[in-house]
Amino acid sequence: MALDTDAPLNSLGLPKPPAETRVVVAMSGGVDSSVVAAHLAAEGYDVIGVTLQLYDHGAALAKKGACCAGIDIHDARRVAEERGFPHYVLDYENIFKDAVIDEFADSYLAGATPVPCIRCNERVKFKDLLETAKDLEADCMATGHYIQRKMGPNGPELHSAADPNRDQSYFLFSTTPEQLAFLRFPLGHLPSKDATRALAADYGLAVADKPDSQDICFVPNGDYASVIEKLRPGAADPGEIVHADGRVLGTHEGVIHYTIGQRRGLGIGGLSDPLYVVRLDVDKKQVVVGPKEMLATRVIPVREINWLGDEPFDSRPEWTLSVKVRSTRPPREAIVRPTSPTTAEVELLTPEEGVSPGQACVFYETEGTRIFGGGWIWRGA
């Protein structure tokens, strides 16, 4: 199966032959970016593979299942050697810590539920790495993300992937129009991950059957709390588990162990009705619990909005869009009311449960695949 061609020029939409078109491919060592690099090299493009080392290499070597571990750097280099294009490993450890890890820790300590993968795309991959690609005199940068870039009447647009099960639009909403002009996503039109693996097998790539990474790259086994405790000693101070009506129901070993909407593992058995975490009060060191209906949220304040529409965001009093407030949930219809060029009040037509500060609120057209950007949920409902 051929990869995406979204313009009547070369397959990357650029007005020159592939051999004269330099493409930097962001290579994680996984099957997706490896297929992108191998295919573009086979098409005759001037490919340069770049892999980012985002944290301590020695520690990474001992950990499996993360996107940036030492074994992944080896796998990316091997693909480049076999396909005959140069490959570089860039040490972005300090940039990654300052731009992603520190905010992740501070957000959790403030009772939020951060999404570091979005910040990594926004502040590292599509900012510093993209500038590095330009320094290498690349014509564009390609990644293995499952999202589509389509040309519209006003320039490139961001659209959901053809395969809804692989769509990564929630993690890429902060891509700016300027970045979108330079980026390419050759896998976004493929019908399934199986199609990607089939291409990997066609190219004889050793990573064709490599498992997908599941964890945030610096959080082994999804154990957020242990990472935060290492980054911020003393973060797991004990406190009270309190019912929304004021009753003290028990104690906890640190608010960093809890998330909004959590039901299991509260350690307060013996109650007749199930209780959920409805609020985290960091200042009082309290985990506040209540019945499920307390999780329902209709109005969400959003800030740091990146708008990808054709008209200015605040040129209208409101927009009728669909929004996604968790990566695993489908978009829901909403009214988005701008309060400034970068802030809004989002009213959900159907209340959502477990809306948490620190999560993203991503905007989609109600009928179709276009993504209109989004912003960050910034205080609890």
Image (tube, helix red, strand yellow):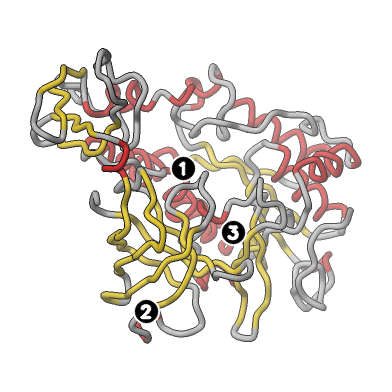
Q: Earlier in the sequence, mark 1 or mark 3?
A: 1
Mark pair 2, 3: CA separation: 38 Å
Residue 56 horizontal side relative to residue 45, left or right: left
Q: Secondary structure at mark 3?
A: helix
Q: Which residue is mark 3?
A: 133
Q: Nearer the viewer, residue 349 or 107?
A: 349
Q: Which residue is mark 1?
A: 92
Around disc 3, counting alpha carbons within 10 Å, would you say few (fewer than 14), some (14 to 19), or many (20 or more)?
many
Residue 201 horizontal side relative to residue 188, left or right: right
Q: Nearer the viewer, residue 190 or 295?
A: 295
Q: Earlier in the sequence, mark 2 or mark 1?
A: 1
Residue 155 image-quadrant placement? bottom right
Mark pair 1, 3: CA separation: 14 Å
Q: Is residue 375 above or below residue 221?
A: below
Q: Nearer the viewer, residue 165 or 245?
A: 245
Q: Secondary structure at mark 2?
A: loop
- Image depth: mark 2 or mark 1 in front: 2
As shown in the figure, which amino acid type bears the numbered disc 2?
Glu
Q: Is residue 296 above or below residue 364?
A: above
Q: Are marks 2 and 1 in contact (CB under 8 Å)?
A: no
Q: Which mark is residue 43?
A: none
Q: Which residue is mark 2?
A: 318
Q: Position of residue 196 (x, y in %)?
A: 79, 44
Q: Residue at x 63, y 25 (%)?
A: 71
Q: Nearer the viewer, residue 173 or 89?
A: 173
- Image depth: mark 2 or mark 3 in front: 2
